[in-house]
Image (tube, rainbow, N blue to C red):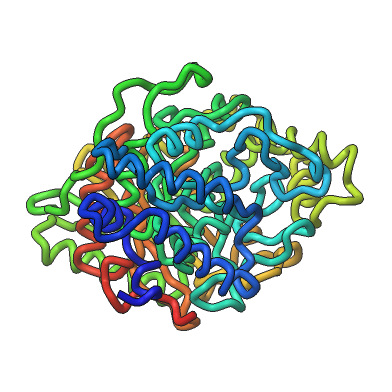
Amino acid sequence: MSDLDAVYLSATELLAAFNAKDLSPVEYLEVVISRVEELEPAINCVADRRYEEARAEAKESAARYARGEARALDGVPVAAKEEHPMKGRSWTQGSLSLTDEVADIDHPIIERIQAAGGIIHVRTTTPEFCCAGFTHTRMWGITRNPWNTDFSPGGSSGGTGAALAAGYAPIGTGSDIGGSIRIPASLSGVVGFKPPFARVPALPPYNLDQFCHDGPMARTVADCALLEDVIAGAHWIDPVSMPHPPRVEGAGTSVEGMRIALCTNLGNWPLDPAVEANTRRVAESLAAAGALVKEITLPWTTQQVWDAAQTHFRTIMGAGIGHVRDEHREVMNDYAIAFADSMDGAGLGFYEGLETEGALWLALGKVFQEHDAMICPTMATDGFVAGEAYLEGGLAIGDGHVHHHILGAMTLPFNIQSRCAVVSVPSGKAANGVPTGVQVVARPYDDVTAFRVAGAVEATGVGFTHPDWRPAL
């Protein structure tokens, strides 16, 4: 097997090879480290290299295999989002205002990955304070999309998305407060899961923010499920985290007889033609696999979604970044300042925001009265230009326009409807070579159905389970 083929092995394939003694965690780690060093000047998605610690952990992993004591992720390289703190390591969140910040605690999902034998060899880039749908900062520079380096891999978990697509690791961590797992999953051609609120434990204060979700990213649906089963479940540090999560690994791929709604524009979103075409191809493939697919409309508008989201962000994330802006404006990125500044204006009151959220749910809840799941695009646009902050004029999409770049993604509604389980799966490519994706949206806390339909999408379409799905690096 060539090194190029090796770096695109899935986590499940790696675990099988390690168990069969066909491959050593120690040897494999060196292969992926070489891959990182070969490509990183061009991709720039690594914020922190953890090679020496990873090499020691790989030796420990190999010893466990020799003793027959392998764990759930033993020896598998993992790309961890820098936002997820690791005790004793930098925790800058992409901000020059936190240049000297060192974490004094492990994030619960970091703790669980390491306890399961996963080897975190790289930590990945984000936009400053994870407040954008692209990834570039004054601290780390521009992170580029392996499929087309003129474009961003998305954000805020863009470093993880790029790392997976480039062959740095088969699995990685992300977080999602407005689409920050699903946006880079779509634009990087990988899989990302926004778990239902409280499914995966987090740290205060954002563990108490119902819009915020930590979750897995991977090159395949099976690997995404593998990682989700490791990180989900109650943790003492997070009082809202839920016990007894459902097991999603092995959810299956059969959609025979399932009722699936197709909603291409979630009300009135403008769409890039390739995004719409690829979404319809997925729907046709699911119908061919035996699903009962029905096209629907929703009475949502982008303005309604925006108003509900801004009411929430103004109170929590906007307030938090606003405090930093007030003290460190001179070192912050322009888009982070713009985000904080935008929260200073008037908008819906908090109660009015909750009323709007409730109205949005009533429409979606009615869909789930008649359907087991819904599919829709993950992104409306075919990509964000690398290094562009989109501070003026919004974003043109197809024959339409949105006033803010984040509405180039169709993810915000499902942070508002935070209990819904949502998996983003590749659906094809746009004309510029940047991948497109679909969201599989399931009922609140129905993680298993979300993964089952996602597996069916992957089986009938595109993605890293298909040998020709690989960026030309």
* x and y percentages locating residue 154 in the rendered image: 56, 61
Give the vertical position of 456 relative to 419 (above or below).
Answer: below
* x and y percentages locating residue 339 in the rendered image: 74, 48
Q: Residue at x 49, y 80 (%)?
A: 473
150 left or right of 164 in image: right
Q: Residue at x 37, y 50 (%)?
A: 298
The residue lying toward the viewer, choosing from 365 and 326, is 326
The residue lying toward the viewer, choosing from 282 and 9, is 9
Number of numbered callouts drawn: 0
Q: Residue at x 57, y 58 (%)?
A: 159
The image quadrant of residue 375 is bottom left
The residue lying toward the viewer, choosing from 153 and 398, is 153
* Residue 366 is at least partly visible in this image: no
* Residue 67 is at least partly visible in this image: yes
The image quadrant of residue 457 is bottom left
* x and y percentages locating residue 459 in the rendered image: 20, 63
170 left or right of 36 in image: left
Can you say which quadrant of the picture contains the N terminus?
bottom left
* x and y percentages locating residue 352 in the rendered image: 59, 29
Give the vertical position of 277 relative to 291 (above or below).
Answer: below
Q: Residue at x 55, y 27 (%)?
A: 207
